[in-house]
Amino acid sequence: MNVVIIGIGLIGGSFAKDLKLVYPEANILGIDTNESHVKEALELGIIQGEGSYQSLALADIVLISIPVNALVLELPKILDAVGDETVVIDAGSTKRLVCQTISNHSKRRNFMACHPIAGTEFSGPSAAINGLYEGKTNIICEVEKTAFMLQEKALEVFQKLKMRIRYMNPDAHDKHIAYVSHLSHISSFMLGKTVIEKEKNERDIFDMAGSGFESTVRLAKSSPDMWTPIFEQNKENVIETLEEYIQNLETFKGLLLNDDFENVYKEMNNTNRIKQILKGIPLTKK
Amino acid sequence: MNVVIIGIGLIGGSFAKDLKLVYPEANILGIDTNESHVKEALELGIIQGEGSYQSLALADIVLISIPVNALVLELPKILDAVGDETVVIDAGSTKRLVCQTISNHSKRRNFMACHPIAGTEFSGPSAAINGLYEGKTNIICEVEKTAFMLQEKALEVFQKLKMRIRYMNPDAHDKHIAYVSHLSHISSFMLGKTVIEKEKNERDIFDMAGSGFESTVRLAKSSPDMWTPIFEQNKENVIETLEEYIQNLETFKGLLLNDDFENVYKEMNNTNRIKQILKGIPLTKK
């Protein structure tokens, strides 16, 4: 199996590692605008060689794992270069613009729009880990626009990586993911900012960070190169989630100001349901 | 060594477990208004017996790990009951009110105001774990008001549990901790609320939760019984942190609305410093 991974960072590199475990015969080539990433991925044994757009014609699978602003620019050129049997999948965190960009491309049927919900706050080939995708959800958009044979090819890979598949349209994807992922990142970045601004003595932050701060602020370590274009492409949805979040914070502040601790308690108690939700246990509604 | 732990939950139970490892001869009694907690702690072998306020007279160490509203009510009665050689330590997340409450108590010198910065989002005796305090910061307030011999006794225990000690006055403690801990909890609770309100289909939350949401919302699993009185006692500081947090979120929203993605990038890039801060590495300021 010939595989080309465009963007050899955490997402692309982890995909390569797991793919090699389930397809030991796979020849995995890497492409990256950052030459040191290619070099590092070769040294780490994540890829077997460096690829080029010329090598795409013979690829069975191409994974594009680059920031979403680069994705919408590169995808048309990548599709131009692939063979008839090649399935191109992406890993972008937004889906509306990318689907729109190639909707009239002559090789639209070679593309499968994907968003594997997996990652860490780290980046680069050295951040690649085994098992990143196991048990994780892969959201596939507009599946009907991908050639059936190529759907099968991609789904076989996802199955071997033990991913769970969900189908969604691009607009619904971008709306849902704004709540469950994009808002989390902004809340975390702004929490980090608020604390750094106030605590001029960084030692104080470190010493007191045990009490929950560290996990809440984890996403504030994320790469601005990746996240700025996500927020740009999903601007309307992200602004909507931010407005609702700010409104909820204002309401909570109002309860504190009014000494309404009965409702402060209720707000927290109602939100405790998140425990069951994250366990995936069906809830009986109150 | 005679030890009495008042409030046998995550904090008290974990303290008991580690204490028993370093002082195998310790006789640890537990007191809890929730009878099932005492029963559970006995069954789990966390305590050797049930205590009462009468047993406090013979205690070497008393740890109070109960919600801070109960703490300010019980501490004067507990001090009334202890012996001259007993050091009473607490684990409350606020320090101003508790120090103020017993400032004129005849046994003020038997009390050491403490806040071990340690915990998880879980509660109850079954949540108690070994090693919870190792390497964690213990903030001690008004240390000069504790009898010197009793300071030594408590510090020996903290040292054996491998805690790091910081001294602070109660007002500074409550102000700092509002940023580094209390605000994190509110941001997490309100994030959980915003997502639950919007995503009526809880399966969607679960399926998409991989991408950072789970860690950011972790603290929203915390106990409202513990957190409501904390917010009540630290109301002024918490409101101040909330206002600054909301302001930062509004600013970020404004950048998105104005398509100012250069500054969206900068905001995130500046906050990435949190990586180094959380590693405790001294930073060279830009």
Image (tube, coloured by chain):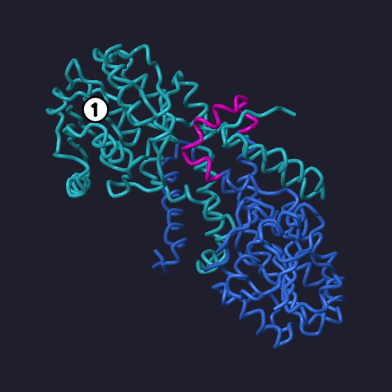
Chain colours: A cyan, B blue
Left or right of B48? Residue B158 is left
Expressed as whole percent of the image width and height from the top left, the position of residue B14 reads: 63, 62
Vertical placement of residue B275 versus B208, above or below: below
Please tell me which residue lies in front, B98 or A220: B98
Q: Amino acid at mark 1?
A: Val
Left or right of B205? Residue B11 is right
| Magenta portion: prevailing SS class | helix
Expressed as whole percent of the image width and height from the top left, the position of residue A67 reads: 33, 36
Q: Chain of mark 1?
A: A
| Tag 1 secondary structure | strand
Magenta segment includes B201: yes
Please tell me which residue lies in front, B55 or A215: B55
Residue range (magenta):
B196-216
The structure residue drawn at horizontal position 28% and vertical position 41%, both measured from the top left corner, is A13
Expressed as whole percent of the image width and height from the top left, the position of residue B157 reads: 62, 77
Left or right of A115? Residue A258 is right
Please tell me which residue lies in front, A192 or A150: A150
What residue sits right under mark 1 in the picture? Answer: A62
Crowding around mark 1 (Cα neighbors within 10 Å: few <14, some 14 to 19, many 20+) is many
The structure residue drawn at horizontal position 22% and vertical position 40%, both measured from the top left corner, is A32
